Image (cartoon, rainbow, N blue to C red):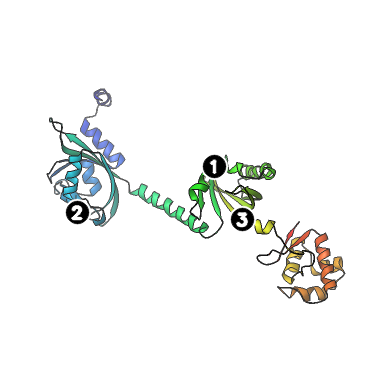
Amino acid sequence: MLEFFENISLSEIRLVRFIESRLHCGLMQRQLGVDDMFWSKGMFSILDLDPQIDKPSFSLLQSLQHPEDRVSFERANANIEAAKPLSRRYRIIRRDGTMRVIHQYIEMLFSSSGKPDRSLGLILDVTDQAALENREKLLEERFLAVTRGTDLILNVLRPDGYVTGVAVGDVTHDEELNRRLGYLWQELIHPEDKEETLAVFQQAVTEKKCVAREHRIMQRNGAYRWRRSTWSPVLDDQHNLREFMSISEDIEKEKVLPVHDHSSSRITGAQIRAARALVRWSVQSLSSSSCVSPSTIRRFEEYDGPTEGNSESLRSIREALEKAGVEFIFPQVGNPGVRLA
């Protein structure tokens, strides 16, 4: 240490002041049972006090602390007597009304008899760090609020596919984290879906774009369920890829739709409208393919629910749309729908 001081040609005092000014820290010392303290210049700076006017003391430091964070004089002395290093965070309210967050470290110094007789403390102004931690906590709470009461699972992934965080809206968060952390999530994908799913994710990495993929995922009981995963890239200011946010939603009811008699289910007007949109057909196009008049098709489409009218015309409309690639679905739960087969 002495060689270090000699090499940089700085006194210990100048070195301490340099460190304090750059790291926003300060030093303090107090004898056991004594209110008066010794403060470095950094202490006065952090507390916004004047060393020519303000006399360092435990009571002065305590008066600046937020009422909810104060430690009594008796407890502080007991801490010294216990001779255990201490670390705690508290808020101070400076005389100009501003509030700062302080992290304090205390070490005990011993007398020649081996008993603790004074404390040496270091304080750091961690206001900016605390604000960042609060923002991160708020962001995490927002993620959990999105998933709470739903079957959504949010994952945070590195560009190489390593999961660094999981937000799930139930009490099984730790269990789900253990299942998905790192590259484990890839092992949960059904073997028949795994290769293409990982290829889709790699496409998102290469092109830095949002992609989605439907695949089966192993549940905690070993069974598989269909889920839709969407990977959205997070970019920095230079448009470099930082990470991905993944949203996984359960689509089992969409993929597995048990019905008593699919073919005999009566299609709805909403399904006809949606089916035309999927295949980009006009009413006239559907009329030409189904041999049903445009006026009849328009009348059917006026109903959101089950259509009324000639069942033979409805069958012709359905067959024409199914030949074009539309699948009519009738889940036991929820409204009828359509999708491209």
Work out whether 39 lies above or below 229.
Answer: above
* Amino acid type, callout 3: Asp
Rendered-image quadrant of the C terminus: bottom right
* Number of marks: 3
Disc 1 to disc 2, C-alpha distance? 46 Å
Secondary element type, mark 3? strand
Q: Within 10 angstroms of label 2, few (less than 14), some, or many (20 or more) residues? A: some
Q: Position of residue 41 (x, y in %)?
A: 21, 41
Q: Is residue 198 visible?
A: yes
Q: Position of residue 104 (x, y in %)?
A: 27, 44
Dot 3 or dot 2: first in sequence order is: 2
Residue wearing tag 3 = 250
Q: Are marks 1 and 2 in contact (CB under 8 Å)?
A: no
- CA separation in Å, label 3 and label 2: 55 Å
Which quadrant holds residue 158? top right
Which element type, helix, strand or loop, lies under badge 1? loop
* In-front residue for pair 237/183: 183
Which of the two marks, 1 or 3, is nearer to us in this view?
3
Identity of the residue furthest to the top in this view: 3
Name the residue tied to disc 2: 63
Label 2 sits on a secondary structure element that is helix
Residue 93: give its label.
none
What is the x, y in percent for residue 121? 22, 40
For image coordinates 26% across by 22% down, the residue present is: 3
